[in-house]
Image (cartoon, grey):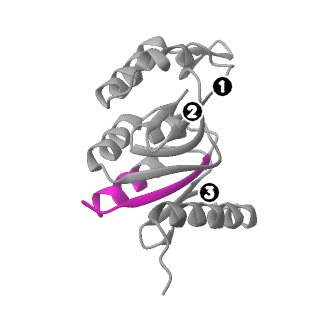
Amino acid sequence: MYFISNHALKIITMISFMIIQGCATEIGVKQIRDHDYKVQGHLDRDEYDEIIRIVKTHPGQTINFYASSRGGTSHDLFDCMDTLYQHGHVYWYSLDQCDSACAVLALSTKHASGHFRLHSFYRHHKHHAEAAPAYNHLILDHLEKYGYDTTKLNHMFHSVEELWDITLDDGKISD
């Protein structure tokens, strides 16, 4: 009889989903196994609501999200962030990219792993995007409540154009 450690199983699962991802171009949140979900494409209220629904229907159970997203809207983000954080057993893995709102959701889980990119949330003003400092401050306040040292993240929320790379290993920011 063979035994596979949880870490090895997570790595095998992650590689399998990367292969699956290359074969499919689905958008949204899709269940791929009992407690495994794929998050792909632009994130908006529908995706946030679906993530919240999934998390609330699995109290105390481990849930894995495998994400590939360039980000999404900032509306309704806080409810999803709080739901992920409060559950405590949500694991968020970046497949090939997890930017902006996707990265903020990862930081909300306590158990994110992979490479992520952050930038300032923004608003449109006279045909261009500009940073939304008050909103960015609220995001950073939430992340600080979740236990992050926001001095490591603060500079990432000043530029709309620049994406800052961070690496997470089980919810810890790697230097």
- Describe residue 174's horizontal placement relative to residue 128 as left or right: left
Numbered badge on residue 27: 3
Q: Which residues are magenta?
A: 49-68
- The answer to whether residue 87 of the structure is visible from this angle is yes
Q: Secondary structure at mark 3?
A: loop
Q: Residue at x 56, y 13 (%)?
A: 158
Residue located 50% across and 72% down the image = 4
Residue at 55%, 26% in the rendered image: 175
Using the numbered discs, state the Cα–Cα distance from disc 2 to disc 1 in whole angstroms.
8 Å
What is the residue that sits farthest to the bottom in this orientation? 1
Task: Specify the amino acid type for callout 1.
Answer: Leu
Q: Is residue 81 magenta?
A: no
x then y, percent, for residue 72: 56, 38
Relative to residue 168, is residue 7 depicted above or below?
below
Residue type marked 3: Ile
- Pointer 2 or 1: first along the chain: 2
Q: Which mark is residue 100?
A: 2
Name of the residue lying farthest toward the right: 23
User: Mark 2 or 3 closer to N-term?
Assistant: 3
Residue 92 lies left or right of residue 40; in this view the side is left
Query: Helix or strand or loop: what does disc 2 sit on?
Result: loop
* Distance CA(mark 2)–CA(mark 3): 17 Å
Indicate whether 55 appears above or below 140. below
Residue type highlighted by circle 2 = Ser
Is tag 1's residue or tag 3's residue first in the polypeptide sequence?
A: 3
- Please give the residue where the numbered disc 1 appears in the rendered image: 163
